Structures are given as C-alpha cells and as structure tokens.
Image (spheres, helix red, strand yellow):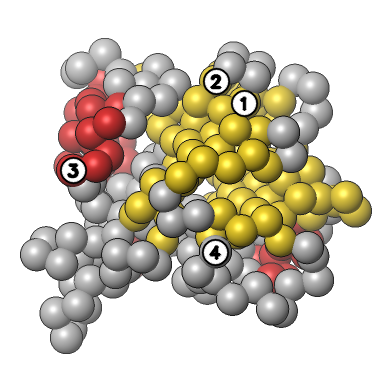
Amino acid sequence: MSVDYEGITFERLGHASIRLETDDGLVIYVDPWGEVLADDPSDGDVVFVTHDDMDHYDPDAIEAVAGPDATVAVYEAVDTGDLAFDVIDLPHEGEATVAGLDVRTVPAYNDPDGDHLDEDGAPFHAEGEVIGLVVTLEGTTVFVPSDTDFLPHHASISADVFVPPIGGHFTMDRHEAADFARSVEPDLVLPEHYDTFEPIETDAEAFADDLADDGIRVELF
C-alpha cells in the first residue's frame, strides 16, 4: 500500500524499510532490508541508513534498490567497508546536504533507565548507535526517528510527516509513539517497525484510533 502526501508517495516495503518518490521522480529509500524486498528495483536515487542492525543496514539490499548513480548516505558510526558505493557520512547530530536535500540528523537510542533493555539490563540501542532523520523534500519535512524511545531532545522537532516505530520491545511502543506524534504535531503519521516478528507485534489499529481522537491522521501503509 502507498500513501500520497503533498506530491510525495510513501510506501512501506515491510518492517522499517520505506520508499519515497516525489512528483519529480526522485526516489529515496530508508533502511532497505532484503527480507522485505520483493524484487531488485534498482531505481533509488538516494539511500539512507540509520544504524548497523541487520534489519536496517543490509549491503545486498542497498545494492538491490540503488540506481546506477545513487547517493548512499549512512550514519558515520556504521562500518561501510563492504559497500560498493561512495558513502556520505551522516553525523550523530547535525545537518547535512545529500543529493541537494536538506537533512537533519537526531540522536536515537533507548533510555538506559527505561523498559527497552536486553537480558543484561543494557539498552537494545545505546546512545551513539542510531540516528533519526529529518529530511526536507520540496518543502515537506519527513521525520523518521528510527529505533528509539521518545526522548527529551525530541520535543524540539516538528514535521509534516512522522514515521515512528510502534512495535515496542526494541523501540518505543504504540503508546509512547502516540505521545511522540502529539509532540511532533504532524499532518500525517505512518507507523513502521511492527508485526514483523513476535516481540514487536502490536495493535496498529488501536494506535491509529488513539491519534484520531486528537485529530491526527494515521495511515497504516
């Protein structure tokens, strides 16, 4: 299923892999993962990667989605030595220009005092391991926070389109994500990172209904 917003088509390929296409034909992928790709489209103009978990950083999937002149932009903490592309390093926190697009990077992690911890009591995603992305496309801001909890520094971010994880366990759950969405005040919310496997199964319809009560549009794309 795809969703259109202000001349941008959003498609959730599965899990946390998304594809965006503008009216001008610019194609962007975020965190493509081979397990959810149906084919090798080779049409991507820009590919973003937020961290090195296998379901987000997949060199074969990047190869599959990238067009011949693609720009690949990866969080600088990821070892990209196995990629057959020149890579633009994205900072832990800051601003960058990628293929003419304005990009803001935002720290993403699990609160070490929160609930999303492994069996040793460590956060699944420690501070410094993941970034979120705020990308501006033809005047529309798209915020992909990636694998994270809703953190204090997120309160400064607003966006037109918000693409949060909602599955819980490794990331924020649907209740945290709903609070996050209210903070961002987007026109459109497109949830991801849920129902791929048992630990992140959730009630996406309940998430959508919760935000609908606040007048926030949610599409389960």
Q: Amino acid at mark 2?
A: Thr
In this picture, is 41 found above or below 204?
A: below
Q: Nearer the viewer, residue 58 or 169?
A: 58
Q: Amino acid at mark 1?
A: Leu
Q: Residues within 10 Å of mark 1 (few under 14, many from 20)?
A: some
Cα distance, mark 3 to mark 1? 26 Å
Q: Secondary structure at mark 1?
A: strand
Q: Residue furthest left?
A: 113
* Mark 3, residue position: 152
* Mark 2, residue position: 140
Res 143 quadrant in image: top left
**Are the residues flagged by discs 4 and 2 in contact, CB closer than 8 Å?**
no
Cα distance, mark 2 to mark 1? 5 Å
Cα distance, mark 2 to mark 3? 24 Å
Give the label, 1 or 4, closer to the camera: 4
Q: Residues within 10 Å of mark 2 (few under 14, many from 20)?
A: some
* Mark 1, residue position: 137
**Are the residues flagged by discs 2 and 1 in contact, CB closer than 8 Å?**
yes
In this picture, is 209 found above or below 171?
A: above
Q: Amino acid at mark 4?
A: Glu
Seen at 68% across and 42% down, the residue is 98
Left or right: residue 170 compared with residue 136: left
**Are the residues flagged by discs 3 and 1 in contact, CB closer than 8 Å?**
no
In this picture, is 153 found above or below 70?
A: above
